[in-house]
């Protein structure tokens, strides 16, 4: 956050002291504008949006190959809404977590590195409120990323493959609007998973003043989680990994939807969000801001 933006946020007339909400909407709007205005974030969104486009074109001109996760590639030609589902499957292991790593690295470490964090804390902005705003903006960023992949994938898929009945993973068929509703549920579910990961990134961001270091650390955390989740010899730890149920979003495409793994995934996401946000708060509330 630049000094000029901080002045715009904090330069308000003196008023009688009132109890403020935990998340300041004015600070949140400023933070969201800052995230949306960064050139590297814009380029990152373009990369995320390019994947479903390239995937749809590749399927249009060649036969799909099976991969990890729900096999949506072979179904793309039957219904264009399978394009965003296949794109999310591809991007969920690397691109989307990397996008969250970049955003969370900038959240605290980036401010400290630029020298704006100390200035921000000299004005009447409580550290808890600031941390809540930072995390809320990361959650919005997670929804932006997943939502963009879903929207672009749906538009390109519909344009290239049409909107015939969608065959669910249970073998039954559902109409277009029901399929679009299932895609919206998938988008929200994966956004919740990335929001849980963002809490880990926010905590890491409070430990350093180097945003690149925080970004790399969260990327390594995610990659190691995927690796451990693929090793059957340590299956006892799988339910505790944040990535373990991310691929379970395919259960939302059954008829009826299977909620067991989805519920477990949401509980794990919530646990990570609460534990690591509190850890970030404990660190940030007592942190000596030197820059």
Image (spheres, rainbow, N blue to C red):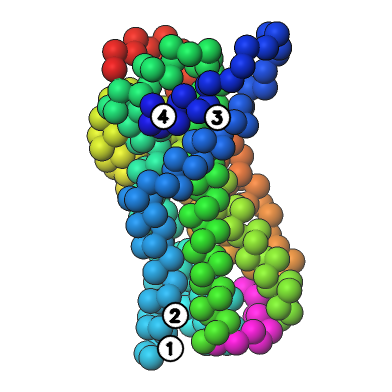
Q: Which residues are magenta?
A: 161-172
Considering only order in the chain, which callout, 4 or 2, is on the residue closer to the N terminus? 4
Label ID, residue 27: 3
Graded by Cα atoms within 10 Å as few (under 14), some (14 to 19) or many (20 or more), the crowding at tag 2 reads many
Q: Nearer the viewer, residue 114 or 65?
A: 114
**Cα–Cα span, label 1 and label 4:** 49 Å
Q: Nearer the viewer, residue 62 or 163?
A: 163
Q: Position of residue 231 (x, y in %)?
A: 35, 51
Graded by Cα atoms within 10 Å as few (under 14), some (14 to 19) or many (20 or more), the crowding at tag 3 reads many
Name the residue tied to disc 2. 56
Query: With 3 as the anchor, is 193 left or right in this view?
Result: right
Q: Looking at the rendering, which quadrant does residue 202 occupy?
A: top left
Label ID, residue 4: 4
Q: Nearer the viewer, residue 119 or 269?
A: 119
Graded by Cα atoms within 10 Å as few (under 14), some (14 to 19) or many (20 or more), the crowding at tag 1 reads some
Query: Which residue is drawn at the image coordinates 35% and 36% (left, top)?
Result: 105
Considering only order in the chain, which callout, 3 or 1, is on the residue closer to the N terminus? 3
Which element type, helix, strand or loop, lies under badge 1? Answer: helix
**Cα–Cα span, label 2 and label 4:** 43 Å
Foreground label between 3 and 2: 3
């Amino acid at each position: 956050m630049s000094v000029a933006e901080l002045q715009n946020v904090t330069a308000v007339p003196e008023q009688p002291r009132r109890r403020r909400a935990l998340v300041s909407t004015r600070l949140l709007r400023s933070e969201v504008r800052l995230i949306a205005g960064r050139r590297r974030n814009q380029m990152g969104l373009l990369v995320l949006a390019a994947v479903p486009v390239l995937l749809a074109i590749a399927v249009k001109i060649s036969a799909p190959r099976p991969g990890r996760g729900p096999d949506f590639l072979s179904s793309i030609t039957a219904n264009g809404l399978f394009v965003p589902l296949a794109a999310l499957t591809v991007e969920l292991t690397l691109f989307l977590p990397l996008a969250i790593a970049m955003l969370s690295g900038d959240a605290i470490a980036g401010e400290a590195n630029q020298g704006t964090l100390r200035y921000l804390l000299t004005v009447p902005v409580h550290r808890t409120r600031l941390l809540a705003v930072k995390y809320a903006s990361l959650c919005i960023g997670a929804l932006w990323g997943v939502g963009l992949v879903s929207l672009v994938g749906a538009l390109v898929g519909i344009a290239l493959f049409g909107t015939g009945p969608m065959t669910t993973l249970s073998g039954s068929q559902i109409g277009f609007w029901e399929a679009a509703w299932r895609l919206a549920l998938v988008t929200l579910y994966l956004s919740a998973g990335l929001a849980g990961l963002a809490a880990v990134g926010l905590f890491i961001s409070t430990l350093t003043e180097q945003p690149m270091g925080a970004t790399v650390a969260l990327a390594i955390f995610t990659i190691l989680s995927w690796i451990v989740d693929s090793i059957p010899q340590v299956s006892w730890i799988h339910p505790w990994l944040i990535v373990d149920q991310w691929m379970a979003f395919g259960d939302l495409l059954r008829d009826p939807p299977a909620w067991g793994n989805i519920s477990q995934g949401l509980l794990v996401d919530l646990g990570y969000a609460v534990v690591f946000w509190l850890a970030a708060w404990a660190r940030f509330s007592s942190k000596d801001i030197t820059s």
